[in-house]
Amino acid sequence: MGDTRANRRFRSQEWFDNPNNPGMTALYVERYQNQTFTRGELQSDRPVIGIANSGSDLVPCNKIHIFLMDRIKAGIREAGGVPMEFPVHPLQETGKRPTAALDRNLAYLGLVEILHGYPLDGVVLTTGCDKTTPAMLMGAATVDIPAIALNGGPMLDGWWQGKRAGSGTIVWESRRLLAEGRIDYDEFMDRVCSSAPSLGHCNTMGTASTMNAMAEALGMSLTGNAAIPAPFRERMAMAYETGRRIVQMVLDDLKPSDILTRAAFENAITVNSAIGGSTNAPPHLQAIARHAGVELDVTDWERIGHDVPLLVNMQPAGEYLGESFFRAGGVPAVMAELARAGRLHVGAMTATGRTLAENLERVRSADPDVIATCDAPLRAQAGFKVLSGNLFSSALMKTSVISDEFRARFLSEPGQEGVHEARAVVFEGPEDYHARINDPELKIDESAMLFIRNVGCVGYPGSAEVVNMQPPDALVKQGVRHLPTVGDGRQSGTSESPSILNASPEAAVGGGLALLRTGDRVRLDLNASRLDALVDDAEWDLRREAWEPPEIVSQTPWEEIYRANVGQLAEGGCLELATAYRRIARDLPRDNH
Ligand code: FES
Ligand code: MG
């Protein structure tokens, strides 16, 4: 750090202000002038700041960014930069079929090309909906120009008949009520729609709120950015301050590689447990870490995170929504509490230009009912379990959503706390599940464990959020809200289901799940972090020899490219070849004429 404007030559000047190459410089400057920039502006020793706009009509969760652009640009201008807004490939969690997870890596690739190939010195990453945040942090890590995340913020709290209606969480609850016959189609629709009262992303601690908390915990945003609801004036102010800040980051040459260290990722894992964060965080953080060149392993989530207490009382692990979380102090209040308990690396550098310790000075929870202390947490040991066994090398289980009822019913064989044996019922994907879940032939009762396969990165493609399978209607009517479920896909971060998910390697590439059959006995041992099919080795070997990969049909060219290059969820679901490209802004691309 320390370069000042006076002695610093910006990357963008290689396009806009290079007297040694007048032919190309003129070509670059003339066309950018026609949108109101003047030659003087482009050749004035000011950094050019990209604003990666992830909002559009197709991405309602991030549409607030369209209205924040003016404030971001005002901040950039005020600090002496030249703002240039550009679009990001749309990533809408609920709208994109077969799944937005497929497109995370596509948006990442697009952003890498833009940041590398255009005259940009720094970038504001406008985040929000689930995959927008990791896609952009992955891109910023690969290119390694100064970058700062700006969340759009959660929607206002939803309300239904006097109770908080949380994004996603109310969907899973209402599906059960529909299955029980307690509500009809119209009430089902009204209940679910009540959870989306304003612009913004999911108001629960689903994947969107989680990933923005992760961006803040990693140090990649201003302090307090993650939790401000989209419509609040504080969100406008945060947009302005973020615009101002990125200019100084460019002047100081404060890059993702200075912030995204091993310590930062360990902090993020700890924060994820404390907020009751999404099971989608591990693959996304793994992907960011790999593109940043930081060693991280899926087992770190249990080693570092399992022991951390739950501090945030927010759906799906708790009761409140985004507005209460913001008023209680948001991510800084959680981190300050963890820091006081000695659970964070407080020397980590952040986008503010200060360390975590400096950012968190004098921060406290304003409402212990919403953000608790480590002395009186909502529950102890709120992090993930990372399971292994003969069905997969790794799979995750979110322990903060295990209810007492579920624990009593499924995690306590007589005399063996944390152990459960069950009969496997196997589905080949969500279509098969929906077609057969109520089929009496399957004899699904409380002794069943539901498995779903071929829904991982290669199989689906992109890995679908389908592992939180609802029990058959007949069981739901008897009050069985969850059966244990297992799969090589993911589940929504808004689900309160204690599924075992993200199983890697997935069935479609020959993971052990591929060999399981309905009727097999399976044994879950949470104390040993294992899940195994109780099938003898000789039989298991026979099945492996007989296994044939499922027939895979891609529907788009990107699906085929993705399937040929994607890794497993445990390794972040990255395009494997892309992880070899690091800090590519160090080299300028060739001229275009
Ligand atoms: Fe976009 Fe939840 S669906 S944030
Ligand atoms: Mg989702």
Image: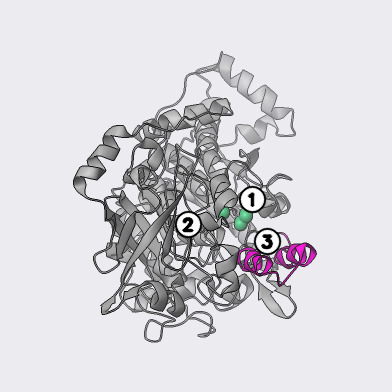
Q: Which of the marked residues, 2 or 3, is nearer the chain's N terminus?
A: 2
Residue 478 in the figure: left or right of residue 422: right
- Which is in the foreground here, disc 1 or disc 2? 1
- Amino acid type shown at disc 1: Thr
- Which is in the foreground here, disc 2 or disc 3? 2
For the residue labelled by badge 1, is the local secondary structure a helix, a strand or a loop? loop
Residue 230 in the figure: left or right of residue 268: right
Q: CA distance from mark 1 to mark 2?
A: 22 Å
Tag 2–tag 3 contact (CB < 8 Å): no
Residue 372 in the figure: left or right of residue 295: right
Crowding around mark 2 (Cα neighbors within 10 Å: few <14, some 14 to 19, many 20+) is many
Q: Residue 236 got which mark? A: 3
Tag 1–tag 2 contact (CB < 8 Å): no
Residue 307: percent from left, percent from top: 31, 72
**Ligand 2, image quadrant it occupies:** bottom right
**What number of labels is visible?**
3
For the residue labelled by badge 3, is the local secondary structure a helix, a strand or a loop? helix
Q: Residue 94 got which mark? A: 1
Residue 49: percent from left, percent from top: 57, 42
Residue 385: percent from left, percent from top: 33, 63
- Amino acid type shown at disc 2: Ala
Magenta range is 171-199
Q: Quadrant of the C terminus?
A: top right
Disc 2 target residue: 215
* Between 577 and 76, the one nearer to me in the picture: 577
- Amino acid type shown at disc 3: Met
Question: What colour scheme does the image use?
Answer: one colour
For the residue labelled by badge 2, is the local secondary structure a helix, a strand or a loop? helix
Q: Which of the marked residues, 3 or 1, is nearer the chain's N terminus?
A: 1
Crowding around mark 1 (Cα neighbors within 10 Å: few <14, some 14 to 19, many 20+) is some
Q: Which of the marked residues, 1 or 2, is nearer the chain's N terminus?
A: 1
